[in-house]
Image (tube, grey):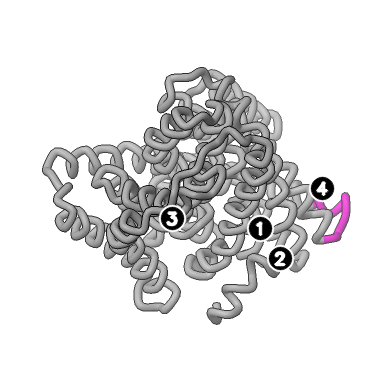
Amino acid sequence: MILELWMVGVVIAFLLLIRVPVGLAFLGPSLWWALADGTSSGFALKTTFDGLNSFPLLAVPLFILVGVMANRLGIADRLYEFCLAALGRVRGNLAYVNVGSAVGFSWMSGSALADVAGLGKMQIPQMVKAGYPFSFAAGLTASSSLISPVMPPSIPAVIYAATATVSTGALFAASVVPAFIMAAGLCAYIFFWTARRRDLGTVPFDRRRFVRAAVGAIGPGLTPVILLGGILSGLFTPTEAASVAVLFMLVLGVLYRTVKVRVLLQSLRETAVITGGIALILGAAALLGLILTRAHVSRDVAEFLTSVSDSPVVFMILVNLILLVLGALIDATAIILVTVPVLLPIATDLGVDPIYFGVVMIINLMIGLLTPPVGSVLYITSSVTGRPVDQVFRGVAPFLVPLVAVLVLITAFPDLALWLPGVLGF
């Protein structure tokens, strides 16, 4: 059995290496192992479909739709204009606007890919035109997009909460402070970088423009109030809040006169494509999880990690290293689904809070979106800009320093994640 399991791992690794979609790379070898082990094809398929049978996961396509609609209905553009009007006179203004608009958009989108695909088309050309090097503009845009999947409503958080059976609201609350710390880390890097660039111009503060932009941003600014206010107050479940947010996006689109049948159909089509890929990974990972359970992988991993040390600190350091490597190789959704059932029981036995563990895991895996060979954000940024992936990564590399520093900070001080859930009574 162990030999066969190693063969499954080798085949999956090979399929991922040749860029077979993650869901198919997991599903094919897993079905082969299950059938070879005597599992009926019906039970294997049932296990696969049971991986999708979760009410909290209904929030995933709805949150994706919110982000897509915010892009296509011009709602994200209003946030960008407000940030530009507010920060225009600051040296390095477009760089700070980049981070500010990413924070604003993150309240509506739980996906880094939606962020960089939507805002990147606008931000990178403007920054290059204003005299910023392409590498800096692309690297910052790609890096700031990671705020979206950390800040609630976070799609990885929904998937982790469903897998770990923890409160989605508590995980959302725990993610807020770390997301702002990520933004602060990127701004600190911008501050030191722009201090050496006296050639970057500023824009005089225009009160009329600022007031006009502020009025235009009121609608988008209400989105987190409705969405997170409803979830954290207990008025909505995350799934219900996502439905309300979709309706609110439609209302804003009608008010801004950007709603068209063609745009809505494009939004639904894009959401369906993204959701289909995630659903395939969810089902395939459920079957792979059954295989790992039958092969006693959880027990073997627990014995190995506890043999190294029974210290929670050492355990979290090892987990960070493991996840950083896995995040560079495998899709984040798949890693959450496969590793949480293995690592979380060990973490809880060592006294590690599952909510804090989830925040650390999500930040870890989001950094993986910027690292090759998988690096989904790298490929989207490359597609948006028309530049080679290696050129984009050269721009991203310096920004990995503040992002990893934030990861170390959150790992070392769990209260940074757990303070807000405690205040809110989770």
| Residue assigned mark 4 | 304
Q: Please rate how many residues cluster around mark 4, counting C-alpha atoms within 10 Å: few if below 14, some from 14 to 19, many from 20.
A: few
| Residue assigned mark 2 | 414
Q: How far apart are marks 4 and 1 (CA)?
A: 15 Å
Residue 36 visible in rendering = no
Q: In which quarter of the image is the C terminus?
A: bottom right
| Residue assigned mark 1 | 344
Tell me: residue 3, above or below residue 159.
above
Amino acid type indicated by mark 4: Phe
Q: Distance between the residues labelled 1 and 2?
A: 16 Å
Q: Which of marks 4 and 3 is in front?
A: 3
Residue at (47%, 33%) from the top-left corner? Answer: 127
Q: N-terminal of the two: label 4 or label 3? A: 3
Q: Nearer the viewer, mark 2 or mark 3?
A: 3
Amino acid type indicated by mark 2: Pro
Residue 268 visible in rendering = yes
Q: Distance between the residues labelled 2 and 3?
A: 33 Å
Q: N-terminal of the two: label 4 or label 1? A: 4
Q: Contact, CB < 8 Å: mark 4 with mark 3?
A: no
- Identify the secondary structure beneath mark 3: helix
Q: Nearer the viewer, mark 1 or mark 2?
A: 2
